[in-house]
Image: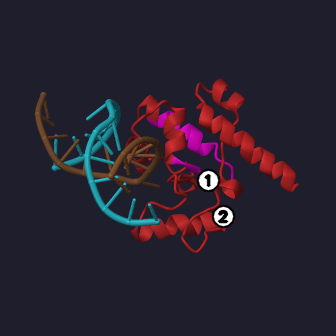
Chain colours: A red, B brown, C cyan
Amino acid sequence: MNDLFEKIYTLARAIPFGKVTTYGQLGAMVGLSDMRYVGDAMNACPDDVPWQRVINSRGTISLGGATGSKQRALLEQESVVFDENGRVDFAEVGWIPDAEWLEENGYKLPPPLAQEKKKNEGEQLSLF
DNA sequence: CTGATGACGAGCG
DNA sequence: CCGCTCGCCATCA
């Protein structure tokens, strides 16, 4: 297994229970421009990687067939809610890692992501 | 070794 | 919102 795969797996393993992130985010954080590769990585991921918490940027599950239903079922077990269009609410369950955590582990947090994280935290605070 | 192919995403129309 | 194209990387015939 190469370094890129391991970096992606490490990130995926850091996703908290009941939260989700996107292929694009993982790809960006490991310095990828071609996100197709992230899908490949998840396809070959070890059993200890919570692959179901990785979805596409539209907030939907990309997979069809049995594996797709399995992914949705796993997420629903984690209290992740899907709307009538099969989409999740990123403001509710979206996960963006801490900039510090990323830096410590050799990842980079793209500015747009940092902004979105800040925004999300603001919303959560106001809710509380 | 060469070429087709993706659990994706941004940009365009 | 839908349907394209391209990205240039790892994998597998």
- Horizontally, is A124 left or right of A65 in the view? right
* Nearer to me, A92 or A26: A92
The chain holding disc 2 is: A
**Residue A39 location in percent, x, y?**
42, 48
Q: Is residue A13 magenta?
A: yes
How packed mark 1 is, by other alpha carbons closer than 10 Å (few <14, some 14-19, many 20 or more), is: many
Which residue is found at the position 61% from the left and 36% from the top? A112
- Which residues make up the magenta segment? A5-22
Q: Residue furthest right?
A: A128
**Three-letter amino acid code at the position of disc 2:** Val
CB atoms of marks 2 and 1 within 8 Å: yes
Q: Is residue A118 magenta?
A: no
Q: Secondary structure at mark 2?
A: loop
**Where is residue A17, by image quadrant?**
bottom right
Which residue is found at the position 49% from the left and 62% from the top? A61
**Three-letter amino acid code at the position of disc 1:** Val
Q: Which image quarter holds the C terminus of chain A?
A: bottom right
- Horizontally, is A15 left or right of C5 in the view? right
Which residue is found at the position 50% from the left and 54% from the top? A56
* Nearer to me, A19 or A86: A86
Looking at the image, is A21 positioned above or below residue A64?
above
Q: Are marks 2 and 1 on the same chain?
A: yes
Q: Which residue is mark 2?
A: A80
Q: Which residue is mark 1?
A: A20
Looking at the image, is A68 positioned above or below residue A112?
below
Which residue is found at the position 39% from the left and 38% from the top? A34
**Residue A36 location in percent, x, y?**
38, 44
Q: Residue furthest bottom?
A: A84
The chain holding disc 1 is: A
The numbered mark, 2 or 1, whose residue comes first in the sequence reads 1
Numbered mark located on residue A62 in the image: none
- Horizontally, is A95 left or right of A50 in the view? right
